[in-house]
Image (cartoon, helix red, strand yellow):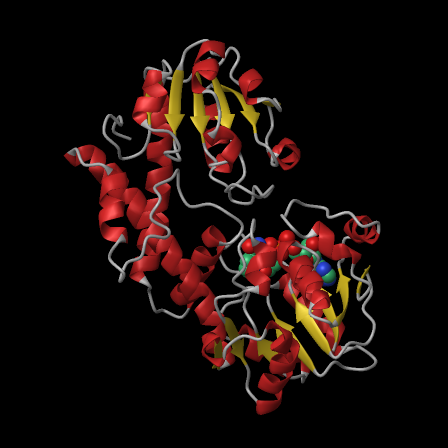
Amino acid sequence: MRVTVFGCGYVGLVTGACLSELGHVVECIDIDADKVATLQSGTVPFFEPGIDALLQNKNLSFSTKATAPDLCIIAVGTPLAENGSADLSQVFAVTDLISVMEKPPKAIVMKSTVPPGTTAKIAARTGLETISNPEFLRQGSAVQDFMQPDRLVIGASSKRGFALMEQLYAPLNLPAERIVNTSTNSAELTKYAANVFLTTKLAFVNELALYCETVGADIDEVTKGIGLDTRIGNQFLQAGPGIGGSCFPKDIRALAFQSKALNHHLEIVQAVIASNDTHQNAMLQKIVNMCGGSVSGKRVAIFGVTFKAETDDLRNSVSTVIIPALQNLGAKITATDPMGMENGKTCFNGVEWKKDPYLAVESADVVVVLTEWELFRKIDLARLAEAMKAAKLVDLRNIYTGDQARGAGFEYDSIGRAGSIKG
Ligand SMILES: NC(=O)c1ccc[n+]([C@@H]2O[C@H](COP(=O)([O-])OP(=O)(O)OC[C@H]3O[C@@H](n4cnc5c(N)ncnc54)[C@H](O)[C@@H]3O)[C@@H](O)[C@H]2O)c1
């Protein structure tokens, strides 16, 4: 099939490159001419493991203008608008463009995350078959997730729509039980439901971790105990500094906004948002407590600014809350991140950047782990403690054990474990 993918971001580029690997002829379109030029030169403008090699495919091209495909896939951004709704302006800009194409495509495929009802609205607006095909890939393992998905969710309103998607994904050879054919509204809500469910699980574990500090329990022991229950499962049970990232925070808020607008309050969704805000404040407090009650004039070394490891993405990362909050309290910040420094430099003011973690802690009063990079896990803690002005470590990813950190000479705090200082 001839496919045009609109949006060369994390989702669009991976989608386009993988579809070309599956044998389709793909052009990837982006409004950002610099990004297109970078891709045309064979360079990926962001960090995503495994994507570089796929750019060599002869069936894959990049442009700022679309030609005449069979399918138009929309993978543009749907950020949060000021009022808390999903900002669909990029989506509508693309659909307006598609609707005036000289040769209309057989269908529009909506891969961007959009609130229930959007795909149907686009079908009405364009008069074209419009299919919802939400994406579930994870940054950091996006290529593998696309090529070996747990499931494909296809929302269509006609047999023809489902048949087109069957043709698109046939080379994946997925067993029928992993393909979920639904209405467009169900497909759109499935995406939000998945993200909100995962967010809820994380928020619950984070709350539980702080409760462990109150009752003298250990979150690692508790999550191991519940995770072995197959009804619960052991994934997404890792306590951390709070929910961040390019999708979870915006998607949960967009769903909350839509439900409010429809006068149907989703109480758990609201509670998760509030719980996460409270948790991030508690994390800030942990850093302040470690500094003896005030960070004013103190230098804080931040290990990791991306929202998780294996990405260069800082969108809604917890670092974007914690760093400015520390600066407001008078702290000076030095930060290090294996892949996030370039984006970090445009995201934060007044931060000193160091490539080498050992240099980042020089003259620091405390080091704070915000992202669980392998580099930080493997660090020589004794050497780190030695390099610091004061050997204090706040591990907000629980990547070290108390024995390791204290054994290396650190005053140590983590989340919800024996010896943790109440956040
Ligand atoms: N990032 C993820 O892990 C992930 C996972 C699943 C779903 N999603 C959803 O996929 C969508 C895209 O996310 P992303 O992370 O790839 O976003 P992104 O910001 O990385 O990429 C969006 C791209 O669209 C381009 N664009 C904007 N307007 C355009 C236009 N009119 N024509 C062509 N290109 C245009 C931008 O320049 C940008 O390159 C969002 O709805 C997101 O919620 C993201």
Can you tell which quarter of the image residue 58 is in? Answer: bottom right
Task: Residue at 62%, 24% (x, y): give it.
Answer: 355
**Within the displayed image, which quadrant is ligand 1 positioned in?**
bottom right
- Quadrant containing the C terminus in the rendered view: top left
| Residue 392 showing in the rendered view | yes
Residue 262, horizontal then vertical, whole percent: 40, 70
> Image height check: is 90 above or below 248?
below
Task: Residue at 32%, 46% (x, y): give it.
Answer: 275
> Image height check: is 22 above or below 221?
below
Residue 27, horizontal then vertical, whole percent: 78, 66
Residue 35, horizontal then vertical, whole percent: 77, 50
Horizontal relation, residue 295 to residue 311: left or right: left
Task: Residue at 65%, 51% (x, y): give it.
Answer: 50
Can you tell which quarter of the image residue 119 is in? Answer: bottom right
Horizontal relation, residue 148 to residue 201: left or right: right
Can you tell which quarter of the image residue 290 is in? Answer: top left
| Residue 87 showing in the rendered view | no
